[in-house]
Image (spheres, rainbow, N blue to C red):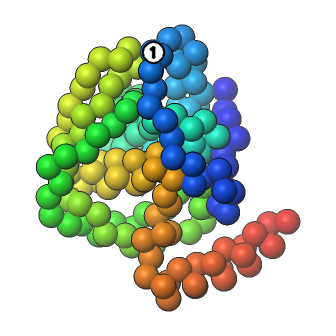
Amino acid sequence: MKLPIIVYPDKKLKTVSQAVEDFNTDLHKFLDDMYDTMIESNGIGLAAIQVAKPDRILLLCIPDEDGEQDKKDLLEIINPKVSNEKGTIVYQEGCLSVPSFYEDIERYEKLTLDYQDRHGKEMRLEAEGLLSVAIQHEIDHLDGKLFIEKLPYGRRKKFEKEYKKLQKSNK
Ligand code: QAP
Ligand code: CO
């Protein structure tokens, strides 16, 4: 079932999400709903707070070389913790909660991620490139942060102006 996505400037996106403690069937149903929401919205990543749930949960499904999104590449990441950050990478980011806006953002190029899967099992992965960027973007959501907060002052001003204009034209 597809859930409604909260969009900027909704203040709920500033919520700091809480650790998940119960790995039960309610969680599994919610993860399935997050997946439907992400795919039907043409997203590659989604954090639980974007569908109004303040839990430390994120989903990623990075397209392969042919641009295909395969469910076997789905990552369900719960209670994530990043370490071993290395290097820098600039990537043009977007966000389902900031529709129709894309900007270059600098992130770490590589990192190690510790997390739990849907059963509470401890997992670890090494990420680089787009996967590393997406992990950092989604974990920022869990801490109540959006990628537009990383823009330098001038570009942020330009964004606010363009975004307001777009919101008006969509009314
Ligand atoms: C976060 O973003 C991300 O504006 C995931 O009209 C982005 O899935 C991580 C989307 C870039 C790494 C690199 C945005 C879809 C999807 C839009 C998304 C839109 C339709 C964004
Ligand atoms: Co986002």
In the drawing, does residue 167 fall left or right of residue 90? right
Q: Does any atom of ligand 2 lie closer than 8 Å to the CB of label 1?
A: no
Q: Position of residue 165 (x, y in %)?
A: 74, 78
Which quadrant does the N terminus fall into? top right
In the rendered image, residue 170, in percent from the top left (x then y), is placed at 80, 66
Q: Residue at x 50, y 60 (%)?
A: 146
Foreground pick, 83 / 67: 83
Neighbourhood count class around disc 1 (C-alpha, 10 Å): few under 14, some 14–19, many 20 upward: some
Tell me where residue 11 appears, x and y as whole percent.
66, 56
State how many labels appear. Answer: 1
Q: Is residue 147 left or right of residue 130?
A: right
From what the image shows, is residue 116 above or below residue 145?
A: above
**Residue 166 in the image, given as x and y percentages of width and height:** 72, 73
List the single residue furthest toward the bottom: 154
Residue 48 visible in the snapshot? no
Q: Nearer the viewer, residue 135 or 99?
A: 135
Q: Nearer the viewer, residue 62 or 135?
A: 135
Q: At x 23% / y 60%, what residue is drawn? A: 108
Q: Quadrant of the C terminus?
A: bottom right
Name the residue that disc number 1 marks: 23
- Secondary structure type for disc 1: loop
Which quarter of the figure has residue 76? top left
Determine if residue 115 is in view: yes
**Residue shown at 49%/35% (left/top)?**
18
Left/right of residue 80 with respect to residue 166 in the rendered view: left
Circle 1: residue type: Phe
Residue shown at 29% from the left, 48% from the top: 131
